[in-house]
């Protein structure tokens, strides 16, 4: 599997939009391959088409703002004191890890992530939500997206 920094960065931009529109703050899994990706969050209902459209719109606005994506190392204890649980996803970081790689898109998304990212949101290019699926039994919402190959 080839990892694309744009796709990983898009996951963070989308997550910020999902949190704003739906209030869903816990990521349960992410998947990425080439210019395609999927974000899965804990959620308790099927979203409307308008909500999905709004998520896509906000994500693309954040990309167009072309703001800096910060990525830095931080002592785990300090990071937990400063940011609390919101840096974590549902899948835990192993206990022996004492330094976290923190990704921050200011006022949008903060998350520990060991992936590679672009330096700015503008480098990501246009993001399109291709499909979404609410899984009632798991109480999870999957959002599949694709990046323009030639932004
Ligand atoms: Zn990442």
Image (spheres, rainbow, N blue to C red):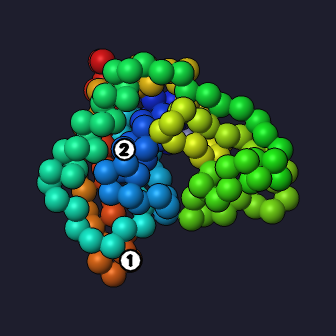
Numbered badge on residue 64: none
Quarter of the image with the C terminus is top left
Q: Residue at x 24, y 36 (%)?
A: 57
Callout in the foreground (1, 2)? 2
- Mark 1: few, some, or many residues within 10 Å (few <14, many ≥20)? few
In the rendering, at what x and y percent does residue 48 appear?
A: 16, 59
Is residue 5 shown left or right of residue 61? Answer: right
Whether residue 37 is visible: no
* Element assignment for label 2: helix
Residue pointed to by mark 2: 17
Q: Earlier in the sequence, mark 1 or mark 2?
A: 2
The answer to whether residue 9 is left or right of residue 64 is right
User: Relative to 142, is 102 above or below?
Assistant: above
| Ligand 1 found in image quarter | top right
Query: Where in the figure is residue 44, as x and y percent of width and height?
Result: 33, 73
- Observer-nearest of 148 and 136: 136
Q: Seen from this angle, which residue lies furthest left?
A: 49
Q: Position of residue 117 (x, y in %)?
A: 55, 30
């Amino acid at each position: 599997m080839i990892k694309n920094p744009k796709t990983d960065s898009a996951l963070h931009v989308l997550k910020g939009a999902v949190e704003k529109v739906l209030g869903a703050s816990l990521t349960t899994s992410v998947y990425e391959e080439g210019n395609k990706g999927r974000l899965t969050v804990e959620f308790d209902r099927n979203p409307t088409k308008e909500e999905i459209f709004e998520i896509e719109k906000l994500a693309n606005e954040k990309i167009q703002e072309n703001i800096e994506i910060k990525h830095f190392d931080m002592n785990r204890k300090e990071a937990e004191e400063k940011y609390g649980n919101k840096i974590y996803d549902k899948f835990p970081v192993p206990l022996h890890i004492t330094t976290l790689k923190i990704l921050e898109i200011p006022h949008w998304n903060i998350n520990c992530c060991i992936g590679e990212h672009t330096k700015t949101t503008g480098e990501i290019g246009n993001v399109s939500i291709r499909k979404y699926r609410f899984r009632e039994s798991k109480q999870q919402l999957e959002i599949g997206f694709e990046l323009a190959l030639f932004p």
